[in-house]
């Protein structure tokens, strides 16, 4: 029993001494406050995510920025007072899958006539390159849906589920 009491006293004394800075009041008040991290600790063996991008997050809805470099055909499409689905795609498998889903909407009796579909394959076409810069797409496929008020109300890079795509077009058509 005496050993347990001695161990408790030694542990308590060690804890008290470890917390003591040994400085006087003037030293303690001139120290800077500690930095508090808001990043949760990552357990061992779990990959640490890359640092946050300096690119600002895209907010939706947001107005289309019409620039002097914006192609005339795109400005003409926006003036039609219909929702617009814009798809930038490439040769990769995911782009081709999304292109197939968009084409199903184009061929649909309800969705086909209710919106304008711009399907743009990334190539050397200068107008498409200008739009790619205007939309600031990161990678393909990229889908944006623009409402009648010329606001981007939906956008997504990468694979998109057909039901999510259909719902986004439906929402644009019915608002």
Image (cartoon, helix red, strand yellow):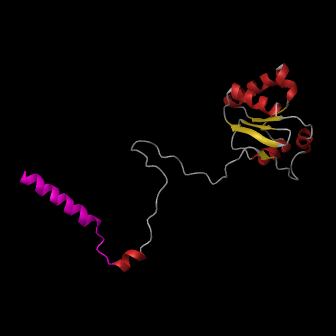
Residue at the extreme left: 2
Q: Nearer the viewer, residue 101 or 12?
A: 12
Residue 34 falls left or right of residue 164: left
Q: How many marks?
A: 0
User: What is the span of residues highlighted in magenta in the rendered image?
Assistant: 1-24
Q: Position of residue 84 (x, y in %)?
A: 83, 35
Q: Quadrant of residue 6?
A: bottom left
Residue 62 falls left or right of residue 77: left
Q: Position of residue 61 (x, y in %)?
A: 75, 44
Residue 34 falls left or right of residue 97: left
Q: Which residue is at a point 47% across and 57% down the rendered structure image?
A: 37
Query: Mostly what secondary structure, the magenta segment?
Result: helix
Q: Is residue 122 above or below residue 70?
A: above
Q: Position of residue 107 (x, y in %)?
A: 83, 21
Q: Position of residue 90 (x, y in %)?
A: 73, 34
Q: Is residue 97 magenta?
A: no
Q: Which residue is at a point 21% across and 62% down the rendered structure image?
A: 14
Q: Which quadrant of the rendered structure holds the C terminus?
A: top right
Q: Is residue 23 magenta?
A: yes
Q: Nearer the viewer, residue 174 or 52?
A: 174
Q: Is residue 65 above or below residue 170?
A: below
Q: Nearer the viewer, residue 79 or 135?
A: 79
Q: Which residue is at a point 11% across and 55% down the rendered structure image?
A: 5
Q: Is residue 20 above or below residue 103?
A: below
Q: Which residue is at a point 70% across and 37% down the rendered structure image?
A: 156
Residue at the extreme bottom: 26
């Amino acid at each position: 029993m005496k050993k347990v009491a001695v161990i408790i006293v030694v542990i308590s004394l060690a804890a008290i001494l470890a917390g003591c800075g040994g400085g006087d009041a003037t030293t303690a008040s001139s120290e800077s406050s500690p930095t508090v991290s808001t990043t949760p600790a990552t357990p061992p063996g779990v990959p640490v995510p890359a640092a946050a991008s300096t690119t600002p997050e895209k907010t939706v809805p947001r107005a289309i920025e019409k620039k002097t470099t914006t192609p005339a055909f795109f400005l003409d499409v926006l003036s039609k007072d219909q929702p617009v689905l814009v798809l930038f795609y490439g040769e990769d498998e995911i782009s081709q899958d999304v292109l197939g889903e968009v084409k199903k909407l184009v061929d649909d009796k309800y969705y086909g006539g209710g919106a304008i579909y711009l399907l743009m394959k990334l190539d050397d076409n200068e107008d498409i390159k200008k739009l790619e810069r205007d939309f600031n797409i990161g990678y393909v496929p990229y889908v944006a849906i623009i409402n009648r008020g010329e606001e981007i109300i939906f956008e997504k890079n990468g694979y998109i589920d057909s039901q999510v795509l259909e719902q986004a077009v439906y929402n644009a058509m019915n608002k």
